[in-house]
Image: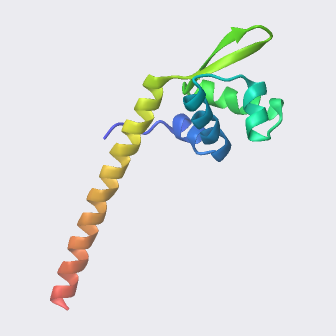
Amino acid sequence: MNAVDDDLWSAIGDPTRRRMLDLLLADGHGTATTLGQRLSVTRQGVAKHLVVLERAGLVRGTPAGRERRYRVDDARLARAVAQLSSVGAAWDARLQRIKRIAEAIAQEG
């Protein structure tokens, strides 16, 4: 299993940041101002969330006039999806082992 990237999951763990990613994916790009208008969050609040997403590598910002235009980094998002799938598969395997142990105990009892 790939190592889990804690910064990545911490960034994705916040519902506001997940909604921001959804909006950026749907629209292709956005600024702190446009995202704030859509999320009913202050521009400053959005900017703080964007810093977290950018630090995790999920979005990339480029200058656009007086603001920065953000886009989702598709490769990094694909890595997050792969990690989620890997974690899910590992938990499925663990649960199957627990089920087999429980069934064996029930048959002995």
Q: Is residue 65 visible?
A: yes
Q: How many numbered marks have been drawn onto this rendered protein structure?
A: 0
Which image quadrant: the C terminus?
bottom left
Q: Using residue 94 as the reference point, say whether residue 59 is left or right of it.
A: right
Query: Which quadrant of the figure has residue 36?
Result: top right
Camera-side residue of 49 and 37: 37
- The residue lying at 79 percent from left, 34 percent from top is 37
- The residue lying at 61 percent from left, 24 percent from top is 54
Name the spot of residue 43 as percent of width and height, x first. Answer: 81, 30
Query: Of all residues shown, which one is farthest toward the bottom?
Result: 109
Q: Is residue 6 above or below residue 59?
A: below
Q: Using residue 69 as the reference point, say whether residue 90 is left or right of it.
A: left
Camera-side residue of 41 and 48: 41
- The residue lying at 62 percent from left, 34 percent from top is 23
Q: What sort of colour scheme is used for the picture?
A: rainbow
Name the spot of residue 20 as percent of width and height, x first. Answer: 64, 35
Camera-side residue of 17 and 98: 17
